[in-house]
Image (cartoon, coloured by chain):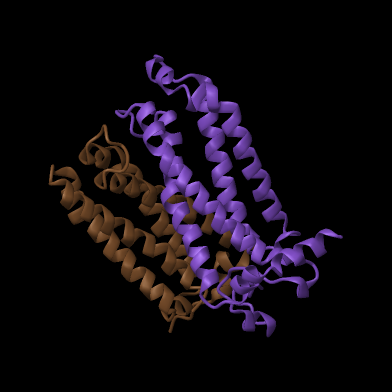
Amino acid sequence: MSVAEISHQIQSIGFLTYIRESGYTYPMILSTHLATICIFGGLILMTDLRILGWAMTDVSVTDVVGQLRRWKQIGFVIMVTMGLLLATSEMDKYYANPYFLMKLCFLLLVGVHAIVFRRSVYGNTEALDRAPQMPTVAKVAAISSLVLWIGIACCGRWIAYYEPKDKDKGKPAFSLNTPGQLEAGIDQRASKP
Amino acid sequence: MLIYDLNANPLNANEWAFPLTECFHITSFALSIGTIALVDLRLLGLAMKHQTPGQLVKDTGLWTLAGLIIVIVSGLLIFSSDPIRYLYNSGFQWKIAVLVLAIIYNYTIHRKVALSNSSPMAGKLVGAISLLLWVLVPFGGIWISFV
């Protein structure tokens, strides 16, 4: 079976077909995805900014990392679940989308990041708080986390702007244009000179 | 009469400009809403229990404001790409209404309650309303494309 066939099989699963064809379920899932980005993505940014010493410096790293960990985990699970539903319900379009694949690579790197820095940074916050200066390893962890997560957000946005060479295969998953307008060749966004 | 040529707007003329502006928009609202949510979680008694809500407001205030400024500037740029279309879009109208309400709420009731040592019950109510208001904003944003 080719990747295209497997992707088509995936998006043909009953409830994924329902999501794709529904009027409101798809935007509800997309909105939930975005709302979790707002809240929990923001918590990730603040943790990184705290480690870098740019924000919340009168709160210990132990408090910021420890007290927010559970909420970031909950947010991550909701975010990924919603993201998977969005992607798999339109797998025909997504599997060949370079930005989607790039986003998956970034997510994989987030996993690597967690493993690499678990012992030295995120599980070692009391030592970080005692250190006279924030150790370089912690700063590297924070900056790479910022780069990875902002990269993920940008890739996610760019997924919608990728148009395959074969125009029939897909249209932007999310843009101001309604499907009808795109089919009629009226593309507000792409009205470039 | 002034005629606004949409095609002259760089956001419509350059294929990178629009998505890039949206990326700034997303990152900055994650920052602004995330910092407000951090205070809300504290008001709800769900996180950051070693700090007072007031301390957290002071710690995050500048980042919230910076995020809001970038989110509004990038939002206005996105709006400029097709003003008429947005103005008549019910999703957009709804989003702006909730956004204005959320910003006013944030800098009045929310701030006041967080900075004063009000009762935990009042804090919980204020935190819950804040979270709800801010979550509705991105919902409105997505709805722009679906109405």
* Residue farthest along the front direction in this orientation: A14
Q: Is residue A113 above or below residue A172?
A: above
Using the rendered image of the protein, determine whether residue B65 is visible from the camera's viewpoint: no
Q: Position of residue A42 (x, y in %)?
A: 43, 46
Judge left or right: residue B101 versus residue A1: left
Judge left or right: residue A168 versus residue A157: right
| Chain B shade in the render | brown
- The one of B9 and A42 positioned closer to us in this rendering: A42
* Image quadrant where residue A132 sits: top left
Chain displayed in purple = A
* Image quadrant where residue A26 sits: bottom right
Q: Is residue B23 above or below residue B98?
A: above
Using the rendered image of the protein, determine whether residue B56 is visible from the camera's viewpoint: yes
* Image quadrant where residue A66 sits: top left
- Residue shown at 80%/67% (left/top)? A165
Q: Quadrant of the N terminus of chain A?
A: bottom right
Q: Position of residue B34 (x, y in %)?
A: 39, 48
- The one of B94 and A27 positioned closer to us in this rendering: A27
- The one of B53 and A161 positioned closer to us in this rendering: B53
- Residue shown at 46%/48% (left/top)? A75
Q: Is residue B7 above or below residue A154?
A: below
Judge left or right: residue A127 versus residue B113: right
Q: Quadrant of the C terminus of chain A?
A: bottom right
Q: Is residue A32 above or below residue B42?
A: below
- Residue shown at 31%/46% (left/top)? B41
How many numbered marks does the figure carry?
A: 0
Q: Position of residue A167 (x, y in %)?
A: 77, 73
Judge left or right: residue A125 versus residue A115: left
